[in-house]
Amino acid sequence: MSSRTLRQPTYFILAALLEAPLHGYGIIKRVEELTGGELRLRAGTLYAALDRLTDEGRVVPDREEVVSGRLRRYYRLTPEGGATLTAEAGQLRRAADVVLSRGQQTLAARTA
Amino acid sequence: MRLSDRFYRVALRVYPARYRAAREDEILSTLAEGQGKRVLPRAGELVALVSAGLGERNRVDLARGGWWGWRGLGSLAIPLTCVNAAVALAGLWVAWSLPNGPGRWWPAFAALAVTLTIAAAARLTRVATVLGLANLALVGFDAATMTLNGWQAPPHLRLLEHYPASGDGEPGPGSHGPA
C-alpha cells in the first residue's frame, strides 16, 4: 500500500465526519456505530489523531457549544480530508476485490 | 467534581501546560460523556491519556530543539529514568551480595532511583537527564575498573569498608552509584 494509507482509527474518524460535524464524544459514538462496536476510541487517541488531522488540514474546528457546563468543540471534514478518505476507501475496495472477486471459487475448488 | 474527573485531570497533567490550557476542558467533557454512570475512571482511558500526553510532549520538544538540544535530551528523560531505576535496583542486589553486606550506603541507591523518577515525572528534564547520564557514566566507570582490578570494589565504594555493615549512629558516606 502507498504512503497514503491511513491508520484504522484515523480512517474511521474521517468517515464519522462524512455527513456532519461532530464533537469529541459524537465522533467516538459514531465510530462505534460504524464499526459495529468493534472500535471504541479512547479520548487520548482521538485527540492525538484530531490534532494531527487538523495540522494536515484534513479536519477543522467548526463551532463550540456549552452543554450542561461542558465544552463541546465540533470538528468538520475539509475538502482535502474528504479526498483523502475517498482515495483510501477506493484503495481498500481494490484490495478487497483482489480476494473477494475470485476467493469463493478458489476456496470451493481447494476444499473440494 | 466527579471522582473520575479527578483521576482524568491528574493523567492530563502529563500533557504540556500550554496544550492543557487550550484543550483540557474539551477533553474532560468528552471523557465525562463517555463515563456514563460509572464512578471509577476507565483504566484504558488513563493509559491512552498518559501515552498521548507523552507523545505530545515529545512532539513539542522535538519541534523546538531537535534531538540534540536540551529539550530533545529532555524527551529521553523518561526512558533514561526507567533504565536508571533498573540499574539502581541491580546495584542494590549486588550490594547485598557483597561480603560486607549492603552496609549503610544502600539508601543512596534507593534515593537515586526515587530522585530520578520524581525528576522525570515532574519533567525536571534537565535534572533527570544530568543525573541519569552521570549515573550511567559512573556505572560504566565502576564496571571498567572492576574488570581491570579483578572484581575489586571501585575506589569510591572501598571507602565504605571503613563503616561497619550494620552499625548505627555513624554517618553514612551518602555516595552514589552501584558497584
Image: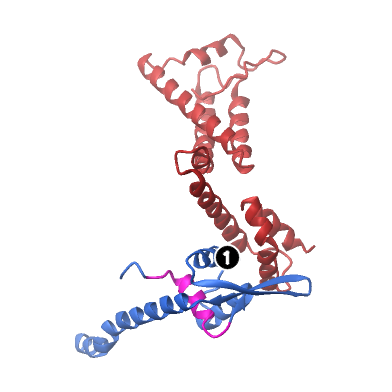
Chain colours: A blue, B red
Is B87 on the left-hand or right-hand side of B105?
left
Is B28 on the left-hand or right-hand side of A22?
right
Quadrant in which the N terminus of chain B is drawn: bottom right
**Element under disc 1:** helix
- What chain is tagged by disc 1? A
Residues A3 and B31: in front is: A3
Q: Position of residue B43 (x, y in %)?
A: 62, 61
**Pointer 1: what residue?**
A47
Residues B92 and A32: in front is: A32
Q: B148 above or below A108?
A: above
Residues A111 and B49: in front is: B49
Q: How many marks?
A: 1
Queried whether the magenta region covers residue A37, the answer comes back as: no
Is B13 on the left-hand or right-hand side of B90?
right
- The residue located at (73%, 62%) in the rendering is B5
- The residue located at (56%, 67%) in the rendering is A46
Q: Which residues are magenta?
A: A5-20
Neighbor class of circle 1 (other Cα within 10 Å; few <14, some 14-19, many 20+) is some
Farthest top residue in view: B162
Q: Position of residue B172 (x, y in %)?
A: 65, 16
- The residue located at (65%, 51%) in the rendering is B17
- The residue located at (67%, 15%) in the rendering is B167
Q: Position of residue B174 (x, y in %)?
A: 62, 19
Q: Position of residue B109 (x, y in %)?
A: 58, 28
Identified by mark 1, the residue type is Tyr
Residues B171 and B116: in front is: B116
